[in-house]
Image (cartoon, coloured by chain):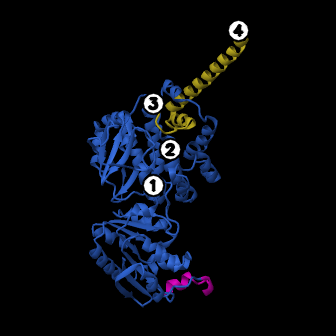
Amino acid sequence: MFFGYLDAGSGSLILQAILGGAAGILVAFKAWKARLTGKRALAEAEAESEVDEPAVPSES
Amino acid sequence: MHRADPGSFRDPASHVVFEGDRVLRLLDQRGLDGWNALSNTKFFERATGDGRLIESKLVDSPDGGSAAALEHPKVPFISYPYEWTFSMLKDAALLQLDLLAEALADGITIKDATPFNIQFVDGRPVFIDIGSFEEYAAGEPWIGYRQFTRQFLFPLMLRAEAGVPFQPWLRGNPEGPTAGDVRRLLGFWQRLKPANLMHVSLQARMEERMSGAAVRNELKTAGFSADLILANVKKLRKLVDGFTWSGSGEGWIEYQSCTHVGRDRESKGAFLRQALDTHRPGRVLDMGANDGHFSKLAAESGAVAIAVDGDEPVLDALYRQGSRVSIVLTDLTNPSPSQGWAGEERPGLIARAQPDLVVAYGLIHHLIYTASIPPPAVIEWLAGLGCPVVVEFVAAEDEMVAKLTANKMEAELHPGRTQSDFETLVAPHFETLATESLGNGTRALYSLQPR
């Protein structure tokens, strides 16, 4: 399935897991954690590429 | 040749067109996949059988660009959530939740959650957007949750908990109030109720903090399941079902029981029946319908009767009686306009009603004396409706008019208010088919035919 024409709202999507009860709170926590981990990994990758940049020879 | 429904274009998978009197839903491949999944379920059979889902049949596609087409019966009159009473929106919300829960049990989901997908037919809510159903994919959340809160839950909550009418909010912005709007509108103690803390305050906060974040895959990986949607839906159903609003004490409910509204009912009814016999209208627009007495008479004659009034308590009572008439809550001095995308998505009330007969009992003196509409403008407005009109004239000597003008000076009233003025104003536009004087002579009925 792919997302519909409707903007579901990211916060509302996470919230509905919490609204699903105890099992849902765990799901929301895991999703939240995965998001933070993903963001950290992305930030690290970006920082690394910035460091690498001067080593790339210019073509001009 | 077919004509597109101006209110059906947002979903690329499915949209409605009209071919004469036929209503066709054109589907692309994704829409067809959704239909194939839905139509094979017990849920579909049951919900169509008991009238909660509109009937649908697969027909030949009228154009080459669609994967398939469905035909639906025509809804006699389309009304919008900002024209509904509290109980109507509440029943629509319960239907939306019930259908989602039952569909999910059969592996189907509803991809949106808007009351524009629900219409009232013979006084009952019917879900009309078959294109909203599609196969549920494991791990996916309920895409329509936020829309459900904005267009169903929050409007009902505003009325039930804060006493704020939802119709102006939905008319002003059909997307509905945001969680942040509702948080600001609720009182301190109302905000602290557990359900409100979650659906309102927490949602507002999370929406602010996570705007634009991609969370779908994270939810799926974390183990999101349909059971979580069902648990949420079950609690939402209980919350919505518990909302109450009593309009008693407001508006006309007390007024009608103790004054003249019931007076002359028999004479007015007989006069209307005569007009119904003469014109045999398909659609009757009862303007200033009050408790719907005359709309019901029109409906008994076989017409589609549309009861329009600006008083929510009386219309809500009419709806709760299980009346078959179509109900429209709107102020006739400011009727629902044409609005939405390109100003055409949701046509205005008069364009939608297209009446064959208009009933205006107990109305025009309120327009003239309360709303200060000049008498010639009132008559021109009636003539502009382009159909026969059954109208009640009320003279300045009438006790009701005396009350309406108690705090107005003669110079503050428009001229042209006598019965003779009325007949002069009417003459260029209408031929008078019948007239009858009522009760104590301060009121008169006219059956008018456009020239």
Q: Nearer the viewer, residue B197 or B341?
A: B341
First along the sequence among labels 1 and 2: 1
Kindly identify the residue that appears in the image at 39 percent across and 79 percent down: B430
Q: Which chain is blue?
A: B
Q: Name the residue under label 2.
A: B147
Circle on res. B89 = 1
The part of the image, by quadrant, that contains residue B66 is top left
Circle on res. A2 = 3
Q: Mark 4 points at which residue?
A: A57
Q: Which of B376 and B83 is in front in this view?
A: B376
Evaluate whether label 2 is on the same chain as label 4: no
Between the C-alphas of marks 1 and 3, the distance is 30 Å
Between the C-alphas of marks 4 and 3, the distance is 41 Å
Q: What residue type is labelled 3?
A: Phe
- Crowding near pointer 2: few (<14 within 10 Å), some, many (20+)? many
* Image spot of residue B294 (x, y percent): 36, 73
- Crowding near pointer 4: few (<14 within 10 Å), some, many (20+)? few
Between the C-alphas of marks 1 and 4, the distance is 66 Å
SS for callout 4 = loop
* Image spot of residue B387 (x, y percent): 37, 71
Q: Nearer the viewer, residue A30 or B89?
A: B89
Residue B54 sits inside the magenta stretch: no
Q: Which amino acid does label 1 sit on?
A: Leu
